């Protein structure tokens, strides 16, 4: 069963714009991560935020975590065509078992 | 370091057959996890192996099984294949020195089609 829900399911923006994706989850977590997947291929790890952290940055990525609302957001700034992919959030409770959201399909238009 | 490798990359089987998928983790990683990805159910955890022992298990029927070898390489087996087993099977490895979470690195996946 899916732990999280992602919003929106699909997002289409122009190159150079910012993209924001949201993820909600149902139970307490230790960590939340974001992954990228290109066309049904393997998952690429983007960023991990721990439950005691509120915000984290990595390059053009900014992730926030609100444990009181059980939600997270991923912001990609200055989007590029190469950012076109599906993005998934995944949570864990301290074991090697990730529970994934349904994903957001992001399309960057040139 | 070489990444996680999975073989084969593509596989076509017929209903009732069985299949074995292989995963080689990143060198030094002792934990291997398997996930199934389908359009309907999304990404779902199958099981995790650490030091040749199954440490975590998802909610899948007994037709799905796995094992891990002393070199940390892992295999998963699906017996009596059903059409619904058609999916992308992803393997992930992590160092996982303790039971606490370590970052997981995913392989490219094996695309299984059941006819």
Image (spheres, coloured by chain):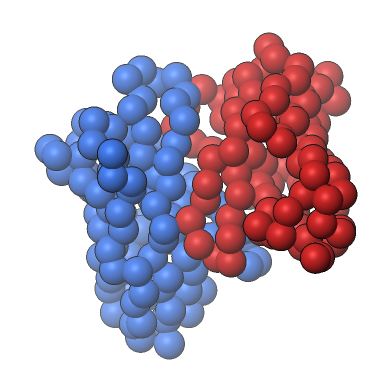
Chain colours: A red, B blue
Q: Nearer the viewer, residue B69 or A44?
A: A44
Q: Is residue A40 left or right of residue B74?
A: right
Q: Is residue B28 visible?
A: yes
Q: How many marks?
A: 0
Please tell me which residue is depicted at 69% across the width and 25% down the height of the picture: A57
Classify A11 as above or below A25: below
Q: Nearer the viewer, residue A40 or B42?
A: A40
Classify B21 as above or below B80: above
Q: Is residue A47 left or right of residue B85?
A: right
Q: Is residue A109 left or right of residue B94?
A: right
Extreme residue in the left direction: B70
Extreme residue in the top direction: A52
Please tell me which residue is depicted at 36% across the width and 82% down the height of the picture: B12
Q: Position of residue A106 (x, y in %)?
A: 76, 58
Q: Nearer the viewer, residue B15 or A71?
A: A71
Please tell me which residue is depicted at 56% across the width and 25% down the height of the picture: A93
Q: Position of residue B100 (x, y in %)?
A: 45, 19
Q: Is residue B77 visible?
A: no
Q: Position of residue B115 (x, y in %)?
A: 43, 87
Please tell me which residue is depicted at 28% across the width and 45% down the height of the picture: B2
Q: Position of residue A18 (x, y in %)?
A: 85, 45
Picture quadrant where residue A15 is located: bottom right
Classify B14 as above or below A68: below
Q: Quadrant of the C terminus of chain A?
A: bottom right
Q: Is residue A10 left or right of residue B11?
A: right
């Amino acid at each position: 069963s899916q732990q999280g829900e992602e919003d929106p399911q699909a997002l289409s923006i122009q190159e150079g714009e910012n993209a924001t994706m949201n993820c909600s989850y149902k139970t307490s977590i230790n960590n939340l991560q974001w992954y990228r997947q290109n066309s049904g291929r393997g998952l690429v790890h983007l960023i991990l935020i721990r439950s005691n952290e509120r915000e984290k940055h990595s390059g053009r990525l900014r992730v926030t975590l609100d444990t009181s609302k059980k939600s997270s957001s991923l912001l990609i700034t200055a989007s590029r065509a190469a950012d076109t992919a599906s993005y998934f959030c995944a949570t864990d409770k301290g074991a090697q078992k990730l529970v994934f959201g349904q994903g957001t399909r992001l399309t960057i238009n040139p | 370091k070489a990444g996680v490798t999975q073989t084969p990359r593509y596989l076509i089987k017929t209903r009732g057959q069985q299949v074995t998928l292989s995963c080689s983790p990143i060198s030094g990683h002792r934990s291997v996890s398997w996930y199934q990805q389908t359009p309907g159910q999304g990404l779902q955890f199958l099981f995790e192996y650490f030091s040749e022992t199954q440490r975590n298990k998802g909610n899948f029927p007994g037709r799905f099984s796995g094992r891990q070898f002393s070199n940390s390489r892992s295999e998963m087996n699906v017996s009596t294949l059903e059409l619904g087993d058609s999916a992308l099977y992803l393997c992930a490895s992590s160092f996982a020195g303790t039971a606490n979470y370590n970052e997981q690195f995913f392989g490219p996946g094996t695309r299984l089609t059941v006819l």
